[in-house]
Amino acid sequence: MLTSEKKALSTRKARTDEQALREHHALHHGNTVLEGCDVCVNLGQRPVLEGASISAAAGEIHVLLGPNGAGKTTLMRALQGLVPLAGGSVNLDGRLGYVPQRHDIDWTFPVTAADVVRLGLVRSVSRWRRLGVSHMKRVAHALERVSMTHLRDRPISEMSGGQRQRVMIARALVLEPSVLLLDEPFTGLDMPTQEELSALFVELARQGAAIVMSTHDLSHALTIADRVTLLNRTVIAEGPPRSLNDPKLWQRTFQVSETSPLLTQVGAFTGAAASDGATKPAPVPMTKYNATTASEGVTHSC
C-alpha cells in the first residue's frame, strides 16, 4: 500500500473513532454511572463514615467538601472497593480512574511522562504480554487529553507541579474510565496552575467523563461544580452549589461559627448569608438506578 493511501486510511479511521466517541458521549451524557448508597466504613471499631450516599453522572463534576478527617478520602477508597464496607453498597457502570492525593511516584526517577502514563496500563495487561500498538495509542490519547503531548518525552524530574499532576491524570485516563476520582488535586499548586487544572476538569466533563473531586479549595470547587456534597462523616447536604444556600449547613459541615469568614467565601457562590433568618432549601433527592458493572456484566440494585 502506498504511503499516501496509508495516511488517508489512518485519517479516515481517526475521524471514525472520533465520531464514535462523540456519539457515545452524546448517548450517555447525564446517565448515572456511579452511586454509593448508605456507605458505612469502620476503622477498627470506630465508625469513620456513616450512611454516606453519593452519585455521579456522565458529563458532571461532583465535588466533595468537608474538613480534614471528614471521610472524603475514605469515601473515595470505598467507592473503589479499597476498604471494606460495614454497610451500604456501591454500584458502578464502567471503569474507575483514580488520582490519589499522595502519588506513588519517585519524582527523581529517570522516567518520562509517557513512561508514567504507560504504568497505568500495567494491571490491565497480562504479565505475559507486552504493550502493543493499541496501548501506545491510548497513551498518546491520554496525554493529548491533558495537553501534554509536547512533553511526552520529558523526564518527570524536570516538570513543574502542575505538569506532573497532568501526567498523573493522564495515567488515570489511559484506562478510559467512565468515572474519574480526584483526591485533593489542587494540593501544593499555585493559583495559576489550579485555574489551569480547573479548566481541564471542565473540558474532561464536557467530553463525557463523570468527575468526583474532593478539595479544600472552595473557590475553585464552587466555580466548576455541577453538584456539591457537604460531608462530615456523613452527608450533611447535597445538590447544585446555589441550592446549598443555608449557612447552617456549612457551619455544621466545617464546625465553624456564624461569623466565620468561610461563610462569606461560600456566600459569593451559593447566595448563602450568615444570618439566623436563612432558610434551608428543599433537599435534592438522589437518583436511584440499576447499574451494570461492565467488567463483570453483573446488575446491582441500589
Image (cartoon, rainbow, N blue to C red):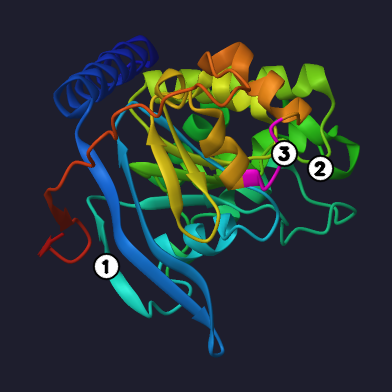
Mark 2 in CB contact with mark 1 (< 8 angstroms): no
Left or right of 54? Residue 223 is right
The answer to which image quadrant residue 65 occupies is top right
In the image shown, does 97 or 17 lie closer to the viewer?
Answer: 97
Q: Label 3 is placed on what type of residue?
A: Ser
Mark 3 in CB contact with mark 1 (< 8 angstroms): no
- For mark 1, give the secondary structure: strand
Q: Which of disc 1 and disc 3 is earlier in sequence?
A: 1
Residue depicted at 32% across the width and 76% down the height? 87
Mark 2 in CB contact with mark 3 (< 8 angstroms): no
Magenta range: 254-258
Separation of marks 3 and 1 at Cα, in angstroms: 34 Å
Left or right of 24? Residue 222 is right
Q: Which of disc 1 and disc 2 is earlier in sequence?
A: 1
Separation of marks 2 and 3 at Cα, in angstroms: 43 Å
Residue depicted at 72% across the width and 62% down the height? 104
- Relative vertical location of residue 301 with respect to residue 278 in this rendering, above or below: below
Disc 3: which residue: 257
Crowding at dot 1, Cα within 10 Å, few <14 / some 14-19 / many 20+, comes out as: some
Q: In front: mark 2 or mark 3? A: 3
Crowding at dot 2, Cα within 10 Å, few <14 / some 14-19 / many 20+, comes out as: many
Dominant SS of magenta comes to loop
In the image shown, does 39 or 100 lie closer to the viewer?
Answer: 39
Left or right of 5? Residue 238 is right
Q: Label 2 is placed on what type of residue?
A: Ile
Q: Label 1 is placed on what type of residue?
A: Ser
- Disc assigned to residue 89: 1
- Relative vertical location of residue 132 with respect to residue 80 in this rendering, above or below: above
- Relative vertical location of residue 133 with respect to residue 50 in this rendering, above or below: above
- Disc assigned to residue 156: 2
Crowding at dot 3, Cα within 10 Å, few <14 / some 14-19 / many 20+, comes out as: some
